[in-house]
Amino acid sequence: MVLVIAESAGGQLKKAALEAATYGKKTAELLGTTCQALVLGNVENPAQLGKYGVERVLHDANTAFNQLDSQVFSEAIAQAVQQSGATVLILSHTSTGKSIAGRLSVRLQAGLVSGANAVPVVSDGQLVVSKPVFSGKAYAETAITSTHKIISVMGNAIRPEQSGSEAPVEPISLPATASKLRIKSVKKQEGTVPLPEAEIVVSAGRGMKGPENWHLVEDLASAMNATTACSRPVADSHWRPHHEHVGQTGIAIRPNLYVAIGISGAIQHLAGVNTSKVIVVINKDPEAPFFKAADYGVVGDLFEVVPKLTTAYKEFKAAH
């Protein structure tokens, strides 16, 4: 059986949970078995996971699971795996998934492939999983030979696909040991799609010359219903908050569309964004390294190009 760990935030299932459910359903079909999901904490309508291929939802609504503690979560999930008889565990390759995947691998003596970008295949009776390596410059195929298998799915690698109706929800009671963590305050990003889940990202670098010009980026992002991001020098200069920093030392993202404005394209930045499906680069320097990775490039002054692009996009939306 395939068991999907469905993440939530604020009582709502994340987009990553729907991606993992779709991935789990396809994996279960490949193996000729069933796909179930585990939901922890206070979550509204976990039954909707059934629309994405889950046949049954196990739900422990204990509020102790509302805040992540990787030790507590790992113990509970390992218990759920043993109770359900699951042999394949699907996680999301998010901060939550990264924090518990290794612990679960040790507890279950399970082979782990993190950051998978495609549905696995069966070769010579073994489950083989593909993932990008060397900052997306190559792909590795790993066969998991252990009895228990764990796969974490890269964000935006699998599009959520509705294929059924709501699934039955079965209450389950799992161990929730007292957390050793003490949370003093919580600061959350509000009003925009989190970068790891964003399908469209508009990002900018030092070419903006200062934070007073960032309204150009925000105007384009607003028109495109996109999430804003920035390069490391921008975050280090405190022009933008650090949660917007994308790159090797920031957040690695995989949007459908990545628009880079005034970013040279140093290798550290490319390492976090080069798995984007489409990259558009706007830079006045025709020799900027980013153009080598771009699907589309505009050589021009961003202070002229970006406002015109924003206006053109608004006109296009109004006409369609």
Image (cartoon, grey):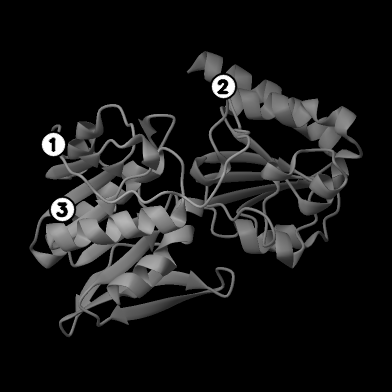
Left or right: where 9 falls relative to 200: left
Question: In the rendered structure, which amino acid carries the disc numbered 1?
Answer: Ala
Question: Which residue is identified by label 1?
Answer: 167
Label 3 – label 2 distance at C-alpha? 42 Å
Label 2 – label 1 distance at C-alpha? 40 Å
Question: In the rendered structure, which amino acid carries the disc numbered 3?
Answer: Cys
Instruction: Please give the name of the residue rendered at 22% of the width and 32% of the height, measured from the top-left corner.
Output: 48
Quarter holding residue 110: bottom left
Give the image location of residue 109, x and y in percent. 30, 77
Number of marks in the rendered image: 3
Quarter holding residue 315: top right
Question: Which residue is identified by label 2?
Answer: 316
Left or right: where 147 falls relative to 178: left
Instruction: Spot the residue most to the right.
Output: 209
Left or right: where 233 falls relative to 279: right
Q: Work out whether residue 319 or residue 4 is closer to the camera in this orientation and state it.
A: 4
| Image quarter of the N terminus | bottom left
Q: Secondary structure at mark 3?
A: strand
Question: Which residue is identified by label 3?
Answer: 35
Q: Work out whether residue 264 or residue 237 is closer to the camera in this orientation and state it.
A: 237
Disc 2 crowd, CA 10 A, few/some/many (<14, 14-19, 20+): few
Q: Secondary structure at mark 2?
A: helix
Left or right: where 70 falls relative to 41: right
Instruction: Spot the residue most to the left.
Output: 32
**Sequence-first disc among 1 and 3:** 3
Label 1 – label 3 distance at C-alpha? 11 Å
Give the image location of residue 114, x and y in percent. 42, 67
Question: In the rendered structure, which amino acid carries the disc numbered 2?
Answer: Phe
